[in-house]
Structure formats: structure tokens, C-alpha cells
Amino acid sequence: MDIRTGDHGEVEVINYILKALGLLSGHLVEVGAWDGKLHSNIYHLIQAGWSGTLIEIDPEKFKALEKNMESFDVKCVCAGVSLAPGHSINDFTPEDFDLFSLDIDGNDYWVWKDLEHNPAVVIVEYNSNWEGETTVPYDLNHQWDGSQFFGASAKALYRLAESKGYDLVGFVKYRNLFFVRKDINTLPVMEVSDLDRCLQYPHHREMLEVQKAQLVHDPHLRKLHLGCGSTHLPGFVNIDLRWLPGVDEIADIRYLHSRDYPPMSADLIYASHILEHFSRWEYKSALARWYDILKVGGVLRLAVPDFDALVDHYQDTGELSDIRGLLYGGQDYKENRHHWCWNFDSMKADLEELGFRDVRRWDWRDTEHAHIDDVSQAYLPHLDKDVGRLVSLNVEATR
């Protein structure tokens, strides 16, 4: 039997894998359990004597789940799984278990990524509409609307599995992928080139344009958004000194402790209108720290007030009030003051002095966060992006 063709059902594939591994009993965890029977990947295992932890967020489905599991060795949990403290998948699972089944039509990628345990077998629903490495952004309140905007693509889950030490051994067309931990796998494996067989598009209703703009591409890349304020970028680790809505981690971005942000660990660092808040004695040490965190070939993406553009605007209009905020900061809280300024040449010199190469301008329209209006899109007159003057100096450099 070749479970790499996608032509077999879930129960058949699961039984084949477990028999090949000699795993005939154990403990399983399922997230998105419904009533424990309907569309279940693992009910037949529970009937065969497996113990389990079944998690379901919907109260009505949970009532049915409890009733259906009364005679089995199963712990039922009514909860939503997220990345929030106390609600992480790791808060609900035992320290050791054998099989993990995940189908929540939303944050599937992020929940599996967050899982600290390494069960022998992992079953994850995938989104067959997407060809590349794509997932919905992490959203605590995500609810599937019946469209293509759910879950993650086969290639995104394949890449995540590789990083966690799993082989892809089979799939059920347009529904589930099956992974086995590499150190115990005895089955033939699927390669990334095989994943085109998993596709079927369009398989669901078309997404809204705003949903398309929110998709996270290449989620395996580690991208840091430094000094994010309340601007949350999907697919980034959003870091700020203050706890605000949209902030993922609290840290002083001038220093970023190596315990949490080790050398050569980030693919992209984005800092929009934050560098000018550091003194003339601090900003270079911050840039040096960010250089250290980037992988070789990683990209530093900066946005700061463009001194040349501000001077040009003042000379053309004589309106000093237009440029004061960008020159001196909002000054509405302690850290919101500007201490330094650059034009392209001075920024290029600073970055090259620290070892960066290929210093160039970047266009906000070509980024994965183009749909989010942050200060890298600052124009004068305000918001006139068609004929106004861009007054943000947007510079990228490569380590």
C-alpha cells in the first residue's frame, strides 16, 4: 500500500502508519475534536483502547463530545488553543504522548509550531488552494468563513515539519498530511516536489482582497518587527518596550539579549521610524546588535525621516509645521523624541561601516506589509501617496 498517492482514507492511512511503527496503543491529542465522532481522524483508535486528550472550543459540540467519550479513557477539554499564556497547546497536553491530530481551520500552523512535544505521528489538515509556502496570520479570534482563508498550505507545513524533525509520509487529497518523526520513521517519504499532487484550486470560495493582503508567505522565515508600537505585522515577531495591543514580546530593542535573540537567528529585521529615537551614541550600537542577530544574507529594513526630503519640502512650501513632527518626534511620552537624522548617503555610510552590504532604497509597495499604513509610507501633503513627496527614507541592507 502506497499512502503517498492520496487515494486512501484517513483511517486506512493511520492504521497503516501505526502498524509500520509498531505503535498499537498510546495516548493521542486532538485539537478541533467536534463531538469526537463526526469527521474524526482518531475515534477508531479510542475505540481500540487508546487514551486521549480531546480539545474543542465550541460549547455545544463539547457537550456532545463529553457524552460520546463517557465510556472511554479520554480527557475532554473545552477551550480555544492559542499562543496566549495559559491557552497554549502546551498547557493542555501531557508531557508525553504519541499522536497529534490538528484541525482548527485557522491557526493550525502557529499551534503546531508552538508545540514543544514531539509525538511519533502528527496529522494536520492542510489548505489545498495554495501552491507556495503560505498560511493565514496568527489571529486569536480567527473563525473560518467558508472561504480559502484558513490554515496553511502543504508546503508551509512540510517546511515546518522539516524544522521539527518530521518526515512527510502520506496525505489524503485535499484534507490531511501525515508526518512521522524522523528518528523512528521506517516508511518511504514524500519530497517537496511531490506536494503538487496535494493541490486542488479553487477548492473553496474566493478570499476577500483584505484577506489576501493578510496572508503570510514563507512563514518559516524569522522576521522581527522592532519598535512596533501598536502596529502588528502578520508573520513577524512584533517587539516593543511598551505593552500595547499587537505586541508579541517586550524588550529594549537597543540591546536584545542574546538568550532570546541569538546571533544569526533572524532572516529579516524591520524597524520603521525607531532608529532616530536613539541618541547619537546609541544608534550605532543598536545597529551593530541587529547585524549580529541577522543571518548571513539576512536583510535589515529601515525607515527613518528623510532629511533631504524634509528640507526640499520646506524650501518649496515654507511650512515648518509640516516637518516638525518628523524632525523632533511627537514628544507625547518619554521615548517619543528624535535625536538624530540621515539622508541616504549618511545612512549608507553608517551601515557599510558596520559591515552591511548592498545598501539600497526599498519601495513600501513591494513589501509583505504594504497593506499596513505605517510611517514608512509618510507623505507630504499627508496621505497624498499619488502625487505627494515621500518623506520617509526607506533603506535596506544585507548582512
Image (cartoon, grey):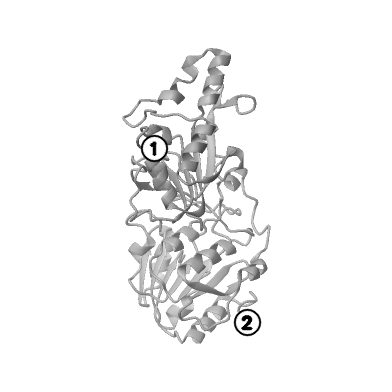
Q: Amino acid at mark 2?
A: Asp
Q: Residue furthest top?
A: 318
Residue 310 location, x and y as percent? 52, 22
Residue 333 location, x and y as percent? 33, 29
Name the residue rendered at 55%, 56% in the picture: 218
Name the residue rendered at 62%, 58% in the picture: 132
On screen, residue 42 above or below 333: below
Query: How many numbered marks does the figure carry?
Result: 2
Q: Which mark is residue 293?
A: none
Give the class, few, some or many, for how many residues have Cα within 10 Å of label 1's Cα (few <14, many ≥20).
some
Give the alpha-carbon distance from disc 2 to disc 1, as whole Å: 58 Å
Circle 2 sits in a helix, a strand or a loop, which is it? Answer: loop
Quadrant where the image shows the N terminus: bottom right
Q: Residue furthest front?
A: 353
Which is more toward the observer, 26 or 358? Answer: 358
Q: Which mark is residue 283?
A: 1
Give the class, few, some or many, for how many residues have Cα within 10 Å of label 2's Cα (few <14, many ≥20).
few
**Could you tell me if residue 245 is visible in this image?**
no
Q: Which badge, 2 or 1, comes first in the chain's sequence?
A: 2
Name the residue rendered at 35%, 74% in the picture: 96
Q: Is residue 128 left or right of residue 330?
A: right
Which is more toward the observer, 342 or 349? Answer: 349
Q: Is residue 344 left or right of residue 292?
A: right
Residue 253 location, x and y as percent? 37, 43
Which is more toward the observer, 56 or 1? Answer: 1
Circle 1 sits in a helix, a strand or a loop, which is it? Answer: helix
Q: Which mark is residue 2?
A: 2
On screen, residue 29 above or below 143: below
In front: label 2 or label 1? 1
Residue 377 location, x and y as percent? 54, 33
On screen, residue 374 above or below 43: above
Q: Amino acid at mark 1?
A: Tyr
